[in-house]
Amino acid sequence: MVADGDRGRLDGPPAEHGLVDFGLGPYVHGTPSRRFPVYTRGNAGEVYPEVVYPLSATIAQALGGDPFGDAIRAMGVLTAAECSEDADIHMGVFGGYAYLNLSESRVIAVRTPGVTLAETDATFLGSEGVAPPHVARAGDRNLLATLRGVRHGLRVLATRSLPTLDAHIAEADLWRRSLPDVAAATDDELVELMTASAPMLNRMFTDHLLVSAGAGAGLTLLQMACADRLDDGTLALVLLSGIGDVASAEPSFALWDLGRMVAADPALTALFDEGMDDL
């Protein structure tokens, strides 16, 4: 998706109260950035594949804060002016669907030593290369932003532990155990729970973005080293494959165990092969 550079929004009728009708009914429609005009469904489409409803968009805007902006400002790779545009800069909902800002990532790549636009695009688009090419602007290169980003990167590389992450895990566990019985709770209690939880979730998501960005930077450096010394950048993933205690990988291990259980039992295998009417 490319924003109209003159109006800062997609071609189409003007949005009213955050909704726009392109002929199929009203959908949530935000304001694209003029400074960073190219957006992508890459990655966003995996997390938010369905249409974003007005209630969800309103809650996120009113209670969710700006975790992307907070993380970007903490890294220092964009200027304060670039983060203060009156638009949905880092991500937004357009025509009912969630998008991430590709132009912003490209500018960050320009300001990061050793990173190319192609590598950045591949993070979101894979090998498709369907996005329009980056149109360079005078402000893309910014020495101060580069220095701030390098300083942040060096701090990340020097980090040996993540006590904040451990604290978040404990806090989330305590919060989860304190939740009321949803079936018995009143609407007012559920609204209060959601409102009170928003600052915590925003803070955790900001740190999630910082940790993810730091992990990505470390992986990129390892890939570059493998490509330079071993002539094969893909070996970086092989080297990292033995790292354990990855929470997001646990469901995959559980699914593997279930598969082995079925394969080892003739009765379960027969039921699996029989399938279901709609599966």
Image (tube, rainbow, N blue to C red):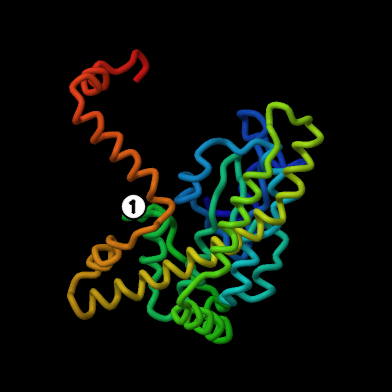
* Category of crowding for the residue at label 1, using alpha-carbon neighbours closer than 10 angstroms: few (below 14), some (14–19), many (at least 20): few
Residue 188, quarter of picture: top right
- x and y, in percent, of residue 83 in the image: 66, 68
What residue is at 45 percent from the left and 77 percent from the top?
160
Taking 209 as reference, is 262 above or below it?
A: above
**Count of marks placed on residues:** 1
Residue 236, quarter of picture: bottom left
What residue is at 67 percent from the left and 48 percent from the top?
30
Closer-to-camera residue (278/58)? 278
Residue at the farthest top position = 277
- x and y, in percent, of residue 226 in the image: 24, 74
- The answer to whether residue 7 is visible is no
Closer-to-camera residue (252/26)? 252
Closer-to-camera residue (187/117)? 187
Locate residue 229 relative to residue 278 in the image: left or right: left
- x and y, in percent, of residue 36 in the image: 58, 63
Taking 268 as reference, is 259 above or below it?
A: below
Taking 61 as reference, is 204 above or below it?
A: below
What residue is at 68 percent from the left and 44 percent from the top?
178
What amino acid is at disc 1? Glu
- The answer to whether residue 76 is visible is yes
Q: Work out which quarter of the rendered image holds the C terminus and state it.
A: top left
- x and y, in percent, of residue 140 in the image: 54, 76
What residue is at 23 percent from the left and 74 percent from the top?
227
Locate residue 232 relative to residue 16 in the image: left or right: left
Tag 1's secondary structure?
A: loop
Residue position marked by numbered label 1 in the rendering = 128
